[in-house]
Amino acid sequence: MTARTLNLDDALYRYVLDVSLRETPLLKRLRDETQALPMARWQVAPEQGQFLALLVKLTGARRLLEVGTFTGYSALCMAAALPDDGSLICCDIAGDYNAIALRYWQEAGLDGRIELRLAPALDTLATLETLGSFDLIFIDADKANYPCYLEHALRLLRVGGLAVFDNTLWSGRVLETHPDSADTRAIQALNLALKDDARVDLSLLPLGDGLTLCRKR
């Protein structure tokens, strides 16, 4: 939910992209189209998408779950990194942007690996517990439900699997002492709870708007 990594000046951020970003023309076109939308701020940064793809490969993940898909950029990054027998379930609510995601997945030839489920994410997650475990879960949906998404993720992940939360620095608003926003309070609560959660190994990376990795023990 940020167009770029926080707290890098323009020149240094440009350098990061110039020496490391391997964005395909299709991904670039999707990112540009997304930037023209009213809710463009929901888009993950391109370096985050590339990092998610690397996580898929590093972990050998085959079954992925994404909570919050928007125009499908992060899903496209992860699905492209899957082996041929891999799969990705995406949870989102119905919106005009769904058609953009489906169009780009089809153009990439990856629509057969991706299943889009349109319903409130908590409802979808409750139905997935009978379908076996997941290797990696990326969570970038409504922030007020982040603590609930953590509990669902830990039930759905295999031991050694990864839950990845986006926006855990929340543009610096996590530093507010008396936040008015329920979203800010939820992210603060998640961050504090994870610090002492013995069920996971943990790292909060200052990538994008903050990316928290939780490995299920």
Image (spheres, rainbow, N blue to C red):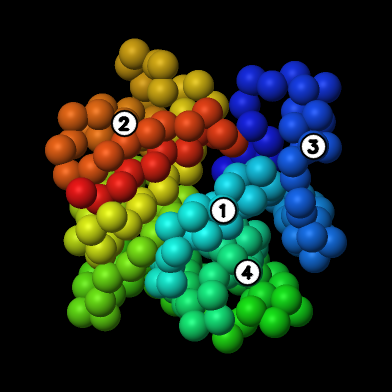
- Are dots 1 and 3 in contact, CB under 8 Å? no
Percent across and percent down for residue 4 are 68, 36
Circle nearer the viewer, 4 or 3? 3
Q: Is residue 4 left or right of residue 69?
A: right
Residue at (18%, 36%) from the top-left corner? Answer: 197
- Are dots 3 and 2 in contact, CB under 8 Å? no
Badge 2 or badge 4: first in the primary sequence: 4
Q: Which residue is mark 2?
A: 191
Q: Is residue 75 left or right of residue 195?
A: right
Which mark, residue 80? 4
Circle nearer the viewer, 3 or 2? 3
- Are dots 4 and 3 in contact, CB under 8 Å? no
Q: Amino acid at mark 1?
A: Leu
Determine whether 174 is above or below 121 in the image. Answer: above
Percent across and percent down for residue 18 are 83, 37
Residue at (56%, 34%) from the top-left corner? Answer: 207
Local packing at callout 3 (Cα closer than 10 Å; few below 14, some 14-19, many 20+) is few
Q: CA distance from mark 2 to mark 1?
A: 24 Å
Q: Which residue is mark 1?
A: 54
Q: CA distance from mark 1 to mark 3?
A: 16 Å
| Picture quadrant where residue 209 is located | top right
Local packing at callout 4 (Cα closer than 10 Å; few below 14, some 14-19, many 20+) is some
Q: Amino acid at mark 4?
A: Ala
Q: CA distance from mark 1 to mark 4?
A: 10 Å
Q: Is residue 215 left or right of residue 44?
A: left
Q: Amino acid at mark 3?
A: Val
Q: Residue furthest left?
A: 198
Determine whether 170 is above or below 102 in the image. Answer: above
Q: CA distance from mark 2 to mark 4?
A: 30 Å
